[in-house]
C-alpha cells in the first residue's frame, strides 16, 4: 500500500518520534540513578525474604514426609503384592492415626485402582461386572423362544408363563432361573395379575441377589423397582415407600456391581418416585421408622456421592498419570513421590510409593486440614521483620493462609517477594508484602512512576491513535466488500428459483399448459424450487444465528440410515432435471445417535449441493454412510473441479471462496461449508476434506456414536 503524506503530517510524525526517543532516554537514566540508591538495601531484604520462603517450604514438606514415613512404614515392602485383607488393615491403621491422610488407593498388577477403606458405589471403569457377558444359555432353548414369542407377539401370557415355568423345572443354573422368574413376573404384570407378579419379584429379591442380566443389570434391582412401581400404581403408598427405600439402601450400600450410568439412572428413578410419593402421602403417616430411614439415606447419599466424586477423580485422572510416570522399582521401592493435579476448582495432592515393581500404594492429602491446621501453625512460629506480611496463595491467587493485608490511606502494601513451593508441590506460592515502605522506597516509587507513566502515556496515545485509525479504516473497507459480495451472491442464488417459480406459475395461471402430465410436472418443479428457496433461506438464518451466538441445537435419538435415504431421495428429485445421478451406499442399519436431525440434514444437503455446483461435466455424485465401533461417517464424493491445496485450509471460513471459483460462472454465498463445520463440531465431530484440483472432492463428516447430550 502506497502511503502519501504532506509536509505537515511528516513534520508531526518526525516531531513525535524525536520527543518519544528523548523521553525514553531521559526516563531510563533517571530510573537507573534512583535504583542505584536502594540496590544495597533491597539485596539484604531479598535475602531475608528468601530464607523465610525456604523455611515455610521445608516445614510444610517436613510435615508431609513425616506422615508419609509413618504411613508407608506400615507396608511390608519385602512381601511384594498385598492381598485385600492386608490392604484393608493398612488403610484402617493409617486413617486412624493420620489426620493429614484423606483417600487411600492401591494399584495392583492388573492396573486396577482400588480403595481399601471405601467400596465404590459403582464400577470405576464405567462398566458393570457383567456388561460384556454374553446371552444366558437358556435363551437359545426352543421352548424359551416359543414362550418369548407368546409374550411379545401374541401376548398369550398364560402360555408364556407355562413355558417359562417348565424351563424352571429343567434348569439349575441360577442366572437362568433368575432370568425366567423375571420373565414370569413381567408376564403376570402385563396380564394384570399384580399380586402374583409382586410375589414372583419378591422371590427374585430373596434368592437371586447376585444374578444379573446379560446387559449387567441385577435382577434383584429390577425386581425392587418393578415392585415399587406396581405398589405406587395401586395406591399402596406405604408398601411403595418401603420398597423404594429398600432399593435406595441397596444402591447406597454397594449391594451390586453396576456401572456408573446404571447407578445414576436408578438413583434418579428412586428419588423421583419417593418425591412423588412424598407429595401424595403426609410424611407423618408413613411411620417414624420409615421417615428416619428416609432422612438417614438422604444424608448417606450426600456423603457417599461426595466421597465418590473424590475417588473417581483419583481413579480416572490421577492414577493413570502416576502409572505412566512409574520408574524402575529397584530405584523407587520405598521412596515417596508426589503429584499435584487440579481437577475442576479443587487441587488434589497425592503422595505415593511403589511396594514392588508391579504395584503402587498412595493417598491423597487432606487439603482442608493442610490449609486450616498445618499452615497457620507454621506461619505463627515465623520471626518476621517489622512491616513484613506473609501469605500463602494457590494457583488462582487465592489466599490459603497468612495475615490480612491492612489497607492504609497513605499507601497500600506492595508485593515484595514471591516464590513457588519446590517442584510446585503443593502448588502454592509464598508471597511477602512490605507494609511499611521506607522514605527512599516511596521517593523512588514516585519518581519511577512519574517517568514511566509519562512515557507510557505518550507511547500509548501515539500507538493507539494510529492503530485505531488504520484498523477502523481497514475494517470498514473489508466489511463493505464482504457485504457487497454476500448480497450479490445471495441475490443471484434467490433470483434463479424465484424466476423459475414465477415463470411456471404464470404459465399455469394463464392456462397455457393443457396437458395434465405437464401441469403435474410444473407443479413438481415449483415445489422443488420452493424447497430450494426455503433451504437457502434456512441456511442464511442459521448462519445469522451462529454469528450472533444464538444457534441452539435440539438433540434427540436419530435413525441416521433413514435420514440419509430421505435426504438422497429428495435431493435426487431436485437435481433430476439436470441429469445428475446420486449413487448411494447406505447400510440397512446404522447405529442411532443423538443429533439435531434438521441441522444434520442441512449439512448433508449443503455437501450434495456443493458437489452439484462444482461437478462441471461430470453428472455423477456418490453418497456413502458407514460406521465403526466409535464413529459414524457421511461421505459425499464428486469428480468435479476440486479444491486447490492453498484453499483447502480456508474453505470453511465464512464468505471465503477460492480465486478460481470466484472467476467462474458458479455462484455461491460462501457460507455452506461454514455451516457444515459448525454443525459437525456442535455434534462433537469433525469434517475431513480430501481434494485435488481438477480431479474432484471428497468431504466426510465424522460424528461420535456414543456422545451423550
Image (cartoon, grey):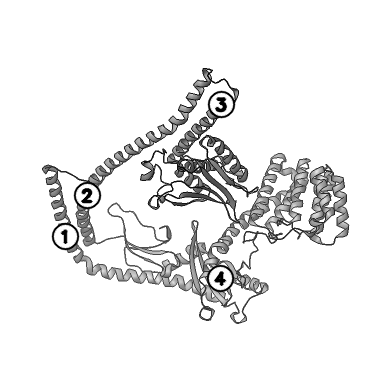
| Front position in the image: 215 or 688 | 688
Give the secondary structure at mark 2.
helix
Q: Residues within 10 Å of mark 1 (few under 14, many from 20)?
A: some
Q: Is residue 202 visible?
A: no
Viewer-side label of 2, 1:
2
Residue 24, placed above or below residue 517: below
Contact, CB < 8 Å: mark 2 with mark 1?
Answer: no
Eyeballing the image, is 528 above or below 478?
Answer: above
Circle 4 sits in a helix, a strand or a loop, which is it?
Answer: strand
Label 1 vs 3, first from the N-terminus: 1
- Residue ID for mark 2: 457
In the rendered image, residue 6, in percent from the top left (x then y), is placed at 13, 42
Residue 495 vs residue 57, the one in the foreground: 495
* First-in-chain label (2 vs 1): 1
- Circle 4 sits on which residue? 362
Taking the spot 21% from the left edge, 47% from the top edge, the residue there is: 462
Q: Is residue 693 left or right of residue 20?
A: right
Q: Position of residue 210 (x, y in %)?
A: 75, 60
Residue 241 x, y percent position in the rendering: 74, 47
Among numbered discs 3 and 2, the one appearing first in the sequence:
2
CA–CA distance in space, label 3 to label 2: 71 Å
Q: Few, some or many C-alpha atoms within 10 Å of disc 4 (few <14, some 14-19, many ≥20)?
A: many
Q: Residue beneath label 1, please?
A: 30
Kindly report the distance in space between the C-alpha atoms of the residues bearing marks 2 and 1: 17 Å
Q: How crowded is the residue under tag 3: few (<14 C-alpha within 10 Å), some, or many (20+)?
A: some
Callout 1 secondary element: helix
- Relative horizontal placement of residue 61, taking residue 414 as reference (left or right): right
Residue shown at the point (29%, 68%) measured from the top left: 45
Residue mark closest to the camera, 1 vs 3 = 3
Amino acid at each position: 500500500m502506497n502511503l502519501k503524506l504532506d509536509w505537515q503530517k511528516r513534520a508531526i510524525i518526525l516531531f513525535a518520534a524525536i520527543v518519544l526517543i528523548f523521553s525514553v532516554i531521559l526516563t531510563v537514566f533517571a530510573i537507573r540513578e534512583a535504583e542505584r540508591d536502594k540496590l544495597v538495601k533491597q539485596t539484604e531484604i531479598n535475602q531475608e525474604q528468601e530464607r523465610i520462603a525456604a523455611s515455610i517450604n521445608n516445614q510444610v514438606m517436613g510435615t508431609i514426609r513425616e506422615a508419609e514415613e509413618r504411613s508407608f512404614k506400615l507396608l511390608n515392602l519385602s512381601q511384594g503384592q498385598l492381598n485385600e485383607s492386608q490392604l484393608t488393615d493398612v488403610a484402617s491403621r493409617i486413617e486412624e492415626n493420620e489426620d493429614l491422610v484423606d483417600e487411600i488407593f492401591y494399584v495392583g498388577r492388573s492396573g486396577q485402582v482400588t480403595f481399601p477403606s471405601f467400596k465404590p458405589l459403582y464400577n470405576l471403569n464405567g462398566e458393570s461386572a457383567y456388561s460384556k457377558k454374553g446371552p444366558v444359555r437358556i435363551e437359545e432353548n426352543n421352548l424359551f423362544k416359543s414362550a418369548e414369542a407368546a409374550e411379545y407377539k401374541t401376548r398369550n401370557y398364560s402360555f408364556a408363563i407355562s413355558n417359562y415355568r417348565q424351563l424352571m423345572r429343567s434348569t439349575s443354573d441360577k442366572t437362568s432361573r433368575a432370568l425366567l422368574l423375571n420373565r414370569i413376573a413381567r408376564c403376570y404384570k402385563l396380564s394384570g395379575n399384580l399380586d402374583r407378579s409382586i410375589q414372583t419379584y419378591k422371590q427374585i429379591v430373596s434368592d437371586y441377589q447376585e444374578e444379573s442380566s446379560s446387559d449387567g443389570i441385577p435382577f434383584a434391582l429390577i425386581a425392587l423397582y418393578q415392585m415399587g412401581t406396581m405398589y405406587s400404581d395401586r395406591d399402596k403408598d406405604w408398601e411403595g415407600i418401603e420398597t423404594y427405600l429398600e432399593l435406595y439402601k441397596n444402591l447406597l450400600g454397594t449391594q451390586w456391581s453396576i456401572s456408573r450410568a446404571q447407578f445414576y439412572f436408578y438413583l434418579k428413578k428412586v428419588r423421583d418416585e419417593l418425591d412423588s410419593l412424598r407429595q401424595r402421602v403426609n410424611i407423618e403417616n408413613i411411620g417414624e421408622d420409615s421417615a428416619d430411614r428416609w432422612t438417614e439415606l438422604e444424608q448417606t447419599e450426600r456423603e457417599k456421592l461426595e466421597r465418590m466424586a473424590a475417588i473417581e477423580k483419583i481413579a480416572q485422572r490421577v492414577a493413570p498419570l502416576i502409572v505412566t510416570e512409574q520408574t524402575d522399582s529397584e530405584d523407587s521401592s520405598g521412596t515417596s513421590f508426589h503429584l499435584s493435579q487440579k481437577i475442576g476448582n479443587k487441587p488434589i495432592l497425592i503422595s505415593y510409593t511403589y511396594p514392588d515393581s508391579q504395584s503402587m500404594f498412595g493417598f491423597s492429602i487432606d487439603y482442608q486440614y493442610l490449609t486450616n491446621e498445618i499452615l497457620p501453625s507454621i506461619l505463627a512460629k515465623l520471626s518476621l521483620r517489622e512491616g513484613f506480611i506473609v501469605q500463602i496463595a494457590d494457583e488462582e491467587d487465592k489466599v490459603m493462609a497468612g495475615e490480612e493485608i491492612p489497607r492504609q490511606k497513605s499507601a497500600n502494601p506492595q508485593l515484595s517477594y514471591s516464590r513457588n513451593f519446590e517442584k510446585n508441590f503443593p502448588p502454592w506460592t509464598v508471597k511477602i508484602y512490605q507494609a511499611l515502605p521506607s522514605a527512599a522506597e516511596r521517593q523512588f516509587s514516585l519518581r519511577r512512576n512519574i517517568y514511566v507513566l509519562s512515557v507510557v502515556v505518550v507511547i500509548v496515545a501515539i500507538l493507539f491513535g494510529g492503530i485505531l485509525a488504520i484498523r477502523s479504516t481497514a475494517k470498514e473497507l473489508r466489511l463493505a466488500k464482504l457485504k457487497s459480495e454476500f448480497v450479490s451472491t445471495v441475490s443471484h442464488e434467490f433470483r434463479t428459483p424465484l424466476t423459475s417459480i414465477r415463470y411456471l406459475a404464470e404459465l399455469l395461471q394463464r392456462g397455457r399448459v393443457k396437458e395434465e402430465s405437464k401441469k403435474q410436472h410444473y407443479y413438481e418443479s415449483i415445489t422443488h424450487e420452493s424447497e430450494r428457496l426455503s433451504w437457502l433461506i434456512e441456511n442464511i438464518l442459521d448462519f445469522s444465528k451462529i454469528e450472533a451466538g444464538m444457534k441452539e441445537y435440539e438433540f434427540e435419538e436419530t435413525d441416521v440410515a433413514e435420514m440419509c435415504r430421505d435426504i438422497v431421495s429428495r435431493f435426487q428429485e431436485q437435481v433430476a432435471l439436470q441429469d445428475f445421478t446420486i449413487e448411494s451406499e447406505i447400510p440397512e442399519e446404522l447405529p442411532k445417535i443423538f443429533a439435531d436431525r434438521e441441522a444434520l440434514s442441512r449439512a448433508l444437503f449443503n455437501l450434495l449441493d456443493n458437489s452439484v455446483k462444482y461437478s462441471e461435466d461430470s453428472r455423477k455424485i456418490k453418497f456413502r454412510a458407514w460406521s465403526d465401533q466409535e464413529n459414524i461417517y457421511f461421505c459425499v464424493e464428486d469428480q468435479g473441479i476440486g479444491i486447490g491445496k492453498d484453499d483447502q485450509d480456508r474453505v470453511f471460513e465464512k464468505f471465503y471462496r477460492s480465486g478460481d471459483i470466484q472467476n467462474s460462472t458458479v455462484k455461491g454465498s460462501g457460507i455452506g461449508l461454514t455451516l457444515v463445520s459448525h454443525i459437525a463440531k456442535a455434534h462433537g465431530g469433525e469434517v475431513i476434506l480430501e481434494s485435488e484440483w481438477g480431479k474432484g472432492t471428497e468431504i466426510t463428516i465424522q460424528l461420535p456414536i456414543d456422545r451423550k447430550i
